[in-house]
Amino acid sequence: MAMHRIVAAVVVWGAAWWQAVASGQITVFDPGQGSVSLSSGATAAAELSGITYVGGTTYQAVGDNGAATIWTLTITVDPATGRISTSGVTGGIAAPGLGADSEGIAYRAASGSVFVADEVASTIKEFGLSTGSQVGSVSLPAIYTADNVQSNMGLEGLAYGPGGLWTANEEALIPDGPLATTTTGSWVRIQRFDETLAAVGQWGYRTDPITAMNPFVTAERSGVVDILPWSERELLVLERELGGAFLPEFRSRLYLVDTATASDVSALPSISAGGYTPLAKSLLWEQSFGLSNFEGMTFGPPLANGSRSLLLVSDNGGGLNQDLYALSVVPEPSLAVLGSAAAAFWLFARRSAAAGKR
């Protein structure tokens, strides 16, 4: 076969491979490091519930204890192993406009600012990192009014990336039904805003039921604690459960969802009665933790093998651990697409060979 035909065939295969990677097929890899203690150093950082990657070794975080500070974290991730090498809270930016219950934070590089979600007030505000001053706010759909938030289960997940700004409440708003139980999950709304911060889509998501009610826990829960866009339509969703049949335990589960396969529920006054297609969940990773309540997650720097580092941070409220946990996200081509690519490659090669004999 002539060299130019071989090159063309490789291009065909490469295009199919890229389509497979871009289709959202991913694997989450755990490097086996386990939880890593995060020191607050000389700062008063505590109860960290949201984290976002700024660049290099710099991350910003917020806590849900009412501190009017955007915390600066320095975290080094080994590009070869994906493990955390060094970490610590190294400073903070005074932000007097923060509310009493900051749960999510998302960095927007173009404006050098972060968005912060407040669970109790049901607000998303924007703060400049250079000054800590509030520079804007997001107009939320009416369903997210603070009067619709039950039992401190309002806006929890927040991320900025492909598709714009994304947010999600932890468990059901009052119109959307009850909180999670051992038999049923809770209905959550995942909301997308475009680059202009206009609300452009909303989807229904069912959390997992609580595995077991614990006699030592008075407020078992199972809800969404953070989200991350993988593409303009796909999201990583982090669920956190507090329960346990004997000793209390936290359990984290990471799911992948595709908004293109679900119905937009923006116009529905309640999503508990059905009549629409909710988001389908694909489990990527899960882990039980004794005293580590992981509430925030963010992508970190790319790794040497082409995967993307993923970091979780835990809330140490109530005497729990303040930890980090490292994972990595590996794009993997779907078998269906690769099968089609292989068939296309074989057919192209045959035709090229036949043409070369003429």
Image: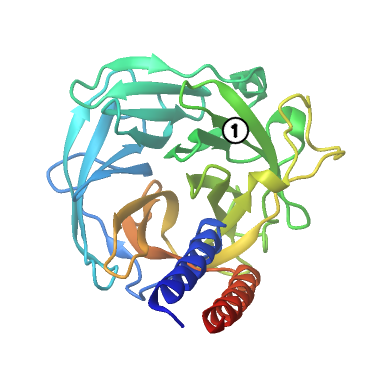
Which of the two residues, 181 or 24, is positioned nearer the viewer here?
Answer: 24
Q: Which residue is mark 1?
A: 191
Q: Secondary structure at mark 1?
A: strand
| Colour scheme in use | rainbow
Residue lying furthest front: 358
Q: Position of residue 37 (x, y in %)?
A: 26, 61
Q: Is residue 243 above or below residue 128?
A: below
Q: Residue at x 79, y 30 (%)?
A: 270
Where on the picture, by quarter, is residue 153?
top right
Q: Position of residue 243 (x, y in %)?
A: 60, 59
Q: Is residue 99 left or right of residue 144?
A: left
Which of the two residues, 202 or 356, is positioned nearer the viewer here?
Answer: 356
Q: Position of residue 56 (x, y in %)?
A: 19, 49
Q: Position of residue 310 (x, y in %)?
A: 37, 58
Q: How many marks?
A: 1
Residue 358, can we see it? Answer: yes
Q: Is residue 116 left or right of residue 70?
A: right
Amino acid type at image mark 1: Gln
Residue 289, can we see it? Answer: no
Q: Residue at x 46, y 68 (%)?
A: 8
Q: Residues within 10 Å of mark 1 (few under 14, many from 20)?
A: many
Q: Is residue 305 above or below residue 189?
A: below
Q: Is residue 200 above or below residue 317?
A: above
Q: Residue at x 12, y 44 (%)?
A: 42
Quarter of the image with the C terminus is: bottom right
Which of the two residues, 160 or 340, is positioned nearer the viewer here?
Answer: 340
